[in-house]
Image (cartoon, rainbow, N blue to C red):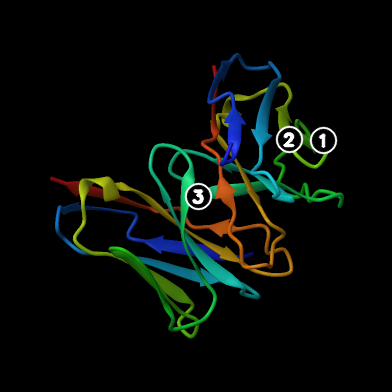
């Protein structure tokens, strides 16, 4: 069974800090890894990573995939209170790659 | 609308009642998914629809759960004889066909509470 583990489970930082979130996976096959941000309601898509070593970046958020280590990190620099959310990692693994396998998430709290 | 729309946003019902949850996907998305999110847990896959193909129902937790998608668009998830363990947030997502490098986009979910 596909397995996705995120760490830490939760963390609290102050505005301006940098956070690094981890996601490791064990899947039979691998197509892609996705990061989502979930505030009150809908998880919103952040990044999809398919190739190892390529960094995806959007503003203060960036993510990189290490297929050798079967892991990914999500970095948030210069954190703001609006970054407070649950960050979810999910993996697509053929043949049933429509069934995203999700980790339990990391809850990030940014204090002013 | 531009995004995935779900209704109702909240539903409180008594144990043993049936409930019906609705999902309206993004226009043009052929794939539709239902997930369940319980407190402190990751999203759990329930069911997948793709075009006119037979749905993958392998994630449905019991035969009290069923779902249909009419006309390739709107989907309803029905839970019969609800139990307290059914309390969760039910999320719907849609996407272009899987494997095309396009992510799933989620609705706001229906928060279901069984008394």
Query: Residue tagged by mark 2?
Result: B74
In the depicted view, which residue is nearer to us: A110 or A107? Answer: A110
Taking the spot 37% from the left edge, 67% from the top edge, the residue there is A22
Taking the spot 80% from the left edge, 42% from the top edge, the residue there is B72
Left-right relation of B8 to B51? left
Taking the spot 66% from the left edge, 57% from the top edge, the residue there is A99
Which badge, 1 or 3, is on the more N-terminal residue? Answer: 3
Query: Residue tagged by mark 1?
Result: B70
How busy is the neighbourhood of tag 1: few (under 14 within 10 Å), some, or many (20 plus)? few
Left-right relation of A111 to A57? left
Left-right relation of A81 to B109? left
List x then y, in percent, for residue B91: 58, 39
Query: Residue tagged by mark 3?
Result: B42
List x then y, in percent, for residue A68: 48, 85
Residue B65 makes an appearance in the image = yes
List x then y, in percent, for residue A31: 62, 73
């Amino acid at each position: 069974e596909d397995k996705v583990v995120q760490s830490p489970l939760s963390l609290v930082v102050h505005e301006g800090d940098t956070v690094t979130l981890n996601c490791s996976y064990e899947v039979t096959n691998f197509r892609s890894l996705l990061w989502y941000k979930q505030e009150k309601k809908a998880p919103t898509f952040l990044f999809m990573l398919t190739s190892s070593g390529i960094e995806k970046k959007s503003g203060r958020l960036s993510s990189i995939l290490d297929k050798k280590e079967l892991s990914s990190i999500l970095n948030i620099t210069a954190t703001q209170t609006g970054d407070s959310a649950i960050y979810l990692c999910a993996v697509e693994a053929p043949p049933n790659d429509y069934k995203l396998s999700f980790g339990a998430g990391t809850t990030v709290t940014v204090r002013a | 609308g531009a995004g995935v729309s779900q209704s109702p946003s909240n539903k409180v019902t008594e144990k043993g009642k049936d409930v019906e949850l609705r999902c309206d996907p993004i226009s043009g998305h052929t794939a539709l998914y239902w997930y369940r999110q319980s407190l402190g847990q990751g999203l759990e896959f329930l069911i997948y629809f793709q075009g006119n193909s037979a749905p993958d129902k392998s994630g449905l937790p019991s035969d009290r759960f069923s779902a249909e998608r009419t006309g390739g668009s709107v989907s309803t998830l029905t839970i019969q004889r609800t139990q307290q363990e059914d309390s969760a947030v039910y999320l719907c997502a849609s996407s272009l066909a899987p494997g095309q490098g396009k992510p799933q986009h989620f609705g706001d979910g229906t928060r279901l509470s069984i008394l």
